[in-house]
Image (cartoon, rainbow, N blue to C red):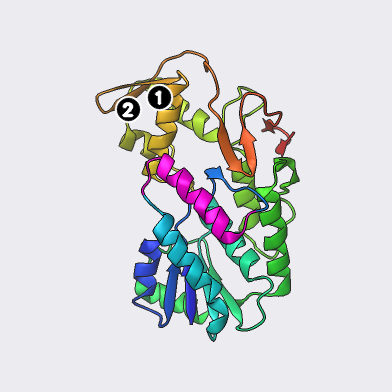
Amino acid sequence: MLHITNGDCAAAVLSQVVQGSIIPWRDVLHEGPVRAGLSLEELSEERAAFIAGAGWGDAIGKFRERDAAFRRAGEHDEIVLWFEHDLYDQLQLIQVLDGLAELRGPPISLVCEAQYLGNMAPERAAELFALRSPVMRRHLQEAQAAWAAFRASDPTQIDPEKPRALRFLGPALLRHLEEFPWTSDSLARSERQILGALRGGPLSLVEIFRRIEEDPAFLGDTVLAWYLQRLEKEGLLERSADRWRATGRERMQRLPRWLGGARVDEAAPWRWDALSHRLR
């Protein structure tokens, strides 16, 4: 069997439960460019360059190893996908399903519940493995459509209401769209949450992280630190020692940010309307 999952923590749990090869996908696809028109390998090169530029480490070797193993997926007797219900995992899931959509060979099955794999007891993982569901053509079609829309240069192609077979995908895509500038203040949801947490005074990274935690989870502390640094460069935050505080100033200038295939900068026309729950 070939098992594909979100990262190394989940892979460590699965290694106690299942037999076969395990591929950790590892990519934080909700940040940085995920442009259309690139092959898996080309996209991985671009993603690795972004990850290195963000200071998150050297990913290119791991991505090349991952991609080579993924290209050999058809050699296995069964492919089992293990993913969670949050945006991080759902984007990985649709990328993997898109890559497997035209595969003619082993059956594909899916383990995806509103539970987190990285801290799961091995006994529970074994239960879920026994209950894994077959991936059908409708799952693959939904994933292909959602992956194409996510990578498009026009993010209004993303429709959170379309997915039905992949039950966690719609809410995850909605959370992605909430990262576009809002009509009310031009801030993303994550930025609004950070500034809201700091209204009472300076906080450490850990304290901010605890106050803005979401369920399903949205980001880890490494990405949060990157957000804080971006807001500091834009003039909205200041740091003293290990504590952050809001400056109370308006944004000086928006730094460019990639959300999927869309480059968001001062000239980008898209705004998230929280009342209609639509990007316009």
**Quadrant of res 175:** top right
Q: Nearer the viewer, residue 231 or 17?
A: 231
Residue type pointed to by label 1: Leu
The image shows residue 89 at horizontal and vertical percentages of 52, 57
Q: Residue at x 56, y 55 (%)?
A: 42
Q: Indicate which disc residue 203 carries.
A: 2
In this rendering, position of residue 30 left or right of residue 21: right
Q: Give the Cα separation between the discs numbered 1 and 2.
A: 7 Å
On whether residue 52 falls in the magenta region, the answer is yes
Residue type pointed to by label 2: Leu
Q: Earlier in the sequence, mark 1 or mark 2?
A: 1
Residue linked to disc 1: 198
**Quadrant of res 106:** bottom right
Q: Residue at x 74, y 55 (%)?
A: 162
* Dominant secondary structure, magenta: helix
Count of numbered circles on the image = 2
Give the residues drawn in magenta, as a range.
38-57
